[in-house]
Amino acid sequence: MKRLIVAGLALLLLIGTTGYVLRGPLIDAVVAQRSAATLTRVDRSTLTDGHLHVWLCGTAAALPDPDRAGPCTAIVAGGQLVLIDAGPGSWRVVDGLNLPVAALSAVLITHLHSDHIGELGEAIQQSWIAGRSEPLPVYGPPGIDHVVNGFAQAYGADVGYRVTHHDDAYMPHAAAAATANVLPLPVGTDRSPVFERDGLSVSVFRVDHAPVDVAYGYRIEYRGRVVVVSGDTKPSASVRRNAQGADLLLHEALDTRLTERASEQATSLGMSRVAKLALDVGNYHTTPIQAAQIAADAGVQTLVLTHVFPPLPNAVARRLFMAGTAEMFAGERVLGEDGMRFDLAPLR
Ligand SMILES: [Zn+2]
Ligand SMILES: [Zn+2]
């Protein structure tokens, strides 16, 4: 009995002490430190340090991949943040990288497959909530106006609630909008300028992702540095031409060795629909070896494989995916992962 009373008293003392700590100066200090770290986590220094910065904010293809968000590349240079594609899940990666999202000044969409536009609504909305003060230009192929208008409709109620709740002075209604900029690129036009702002210039070129009509790649230049994003494409002479001399070529890659094996397996299991889809998907993408060949032909410095398919769950799968690329391309080869960062120092 005596022992029980002592144990009870000890327990009360422990609870009392813990209660004091939870309400006391220690917990206050931890909470203050945590919230200060959250409030100041955004890194704006990359906007003005003269480098051309690139982050991979989504490296998956169309099907869900547990390790990768949908297609997304972030460029930071010349005081601007530009996103190329906004695939499903990519905003969480952008935010997690502490990028200066209030400075988002443009979104470039390569084509209108859902894996490239699924998160556009969040990119528009979240950058506004974070403090973007001007309407957001969204560039893309014909049809991008319908996509932008559709997201405006879908998010219209949310914009209204937030303006009413916080006041227009803090959540300016006029800045919430995105403006669609259709980039018409007539057949036979090799490359066309999109914009040039504070030294950051963007141009668009046509790629071959038929039956998708049309699909684009983008070339970004800043202070002598060049980054090229292929978008989704079969092996394309246009990518080869427009990536000439690039520092970084971000090229899509799908390993048909793996998808064809999956198709055969599906056939043997009587899953004819899956077997057909697995075969079809290979005919409008580029294999890692073909991408390496294009990188060699274009004379790029570094090849980054992105839009990775199929998902690569372990080191063996990743090694298989890259197999044969070294024989084609002597430069640096990188298998893209979400969150990867490349910093290109200015040449002029
Ligand atoms: Zn895609
Ligand atoms: Zn596509």
Image (cartoon, rainbow, N blue to C red):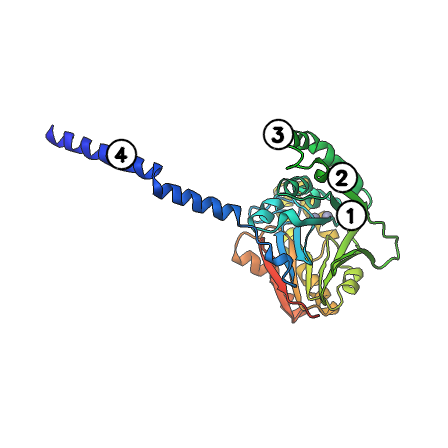
* x and y percentages locating residue 264 in the rendered image: 64, 49
Which residue in the structure is indicated by mark 4?
16
Which residue in the structure is indicated by mark 1?
140
* Amino acid identity at mark 3: His
Question: Mark 4, residues whose alpha carbon is within 10 Å: few (<14), some, or many (≥20)?
Answer: few
Which residue in the structure is indicated by mark 3?
165
* x and y percentages locating residue 91 in the rendered image: 62, 45
User: Which numbered circle lies on residue 147?
Assistant: 2
Q: Earlier in the sequence, mark 2 or mark 3?
A: 2
| Mark 1 → mark 3, Cα distance in angstroms | 33 Å
| Mark 4 → mark 3, Cα distance in angstroms | 40 Å
Closest to the observer: 322 or 144? Answer: 144
* Amino acid identity at mark 4: Gly
Question: Mark 2, residues whose alpha carbon is within 10 Å: few (<14), some, or many (≥20)?
Answer: some
| Mark 2 → mark 4, Cα distance in angstroms | 58 Å
| Mark 2 → mark 3, Cα distance in angstroms | 27 Å
Disc 4 or disc 3, which is closer to the eye? 3
Mark 2 in CB contact with mark 3 (< 8 angstroms): no
* x and y percentages locating residue 238 in the rendered image: 80, 60
Q: Earlier in the sequence, mark 1 or mark 3?
A: 1
Mark 2 in CB contact with mark 4 (< 8 angstroms): no
Quarter of the image for residue 226 reads bottom right
Mark 1 in CB contact with mark 2 (< 8 angstroms): yes
> Furthest residue to the front?
169
Position of 300 with respect to 182 (left or right) is: left
* Amino acid identity at mark 1: Gly
Mark 1 in CB contact with mark 4 (< 8 angstroms): no
| Mark 1 → mark 2, Cα distance in angstroms | 10 Å
- Residue sitting at 68 percent across and 37 percent down? 172
- Residue sitting at 20 percent across and 35 percent down? 10
Height in image: 213 above or below 191?
A: above
User: Which numbered circle lies on residue 293?
Assistant: none
